[in-house]
Image: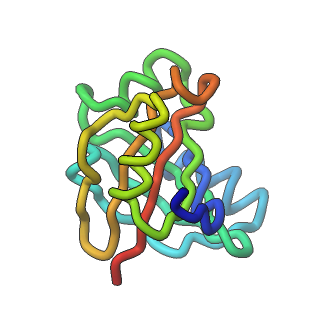
């Protein structure tokens, strides 16, 4: 099995990052590392490092995204748990061979990273992301 290196981040879906930062940054004292648009995921993400992991605040930028649907249905909340892996594609192959349902056949390739999601029906209800750093 491919190595699960660490929990890379915990993603929290929010309707508005600036409003959410009143808790995460202002009340909890967690500094924002940076904010970026992620067009492939139809979202805007704020990265808040905590030790060796991050809290990611994910705001939908399109009404037809998965995050937008999640926010519309639940009002926000923990969206997914992300594990950093050595090889995203190989991990996907291994999981698929074990009958695990994936949301795509190939990893999504973005600058400096590859990522893929495991369907919550295979994980006991938690959306799980696999994340490979490719720098």
In depth, the one of 84 and 12 nearer the eye is: 84
In the picture, the quarter occupied by the C terminus is bottom left
Residue 7 in the figure: left or right of residue 134? right
| Residue sitting at the far top | 73
Which residue does the image show at 77% across and 57% down from the upper left?
Answer: 27
In this view, 104 is above or below 71: below
Q: Where's residue 80, x and y in %?
A: 55, 41
Residue 111 in the figure: left or right of residue 95? left
Which residue does the image show at 56% across and 56% down from the upper left?
Answer: 83
In depth, the one of 22 and 68 nearer the eye is: 68
Residue 61 in the figure: left or right of residue 120? left
Q: How is the image coloured?
A: rainbow
In depth, the one of 36 and 95 nearer the eye is: 95
In this view, 47 is above or below 97: below
Q: Where's residue 22, x and y in %?
A: 65, 52
| Residue sitting at the far right | 28
Q: Where's residue 53, x and y in %?
A: 65, 67
Residue 9 in the figure: left or right of residue 95? right
Q: Where's residue 134, x and y in %?
A: 34, 77
In the picture, the quarter occupied by the N terminus is bottom right
Which residue does the image show at 64% across and 24% down from the upper left?
Answer: 124
* Quarter of the view holding residue 35: bottom left
In this view, 86 is above or below 58: below
Q: How many marks?
A: 0
| Residue sitting at the far bottom | 135
In this view, 20 is above or below 29: above
Which residue does the image show at 41% across and 37% down from the upper left?
Answer: 97
């Amino acid at each position: 099995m491919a190595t699960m290196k660490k929990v890379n981040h915990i993603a929290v879906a929010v309707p508005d990052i600036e409003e959410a930062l009143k808790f995460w940054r202002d009340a909890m004292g967690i500094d924002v590392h940076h904010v970026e648009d992620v067009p492939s995921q139809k979202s805007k993400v704020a990265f808040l490092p905590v030790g060796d992991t991050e809290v990611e605040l994910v705001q939908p930028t399109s009404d037809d995204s998965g995050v937008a649907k999640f926010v519309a249905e639940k009002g926000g909340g923990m969206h997914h748990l992300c594990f950093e892996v050595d090889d995203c594609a190989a991990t996907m192959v291994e999981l698929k061979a074990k009958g695990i349902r994936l949301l795509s056949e190939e990893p999504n390739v973005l600058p400096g990273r590859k990522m893929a999601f495991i369907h919550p029906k295979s994980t006991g209800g938690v959306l799980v992301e696999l994340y490979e750093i490719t720098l």
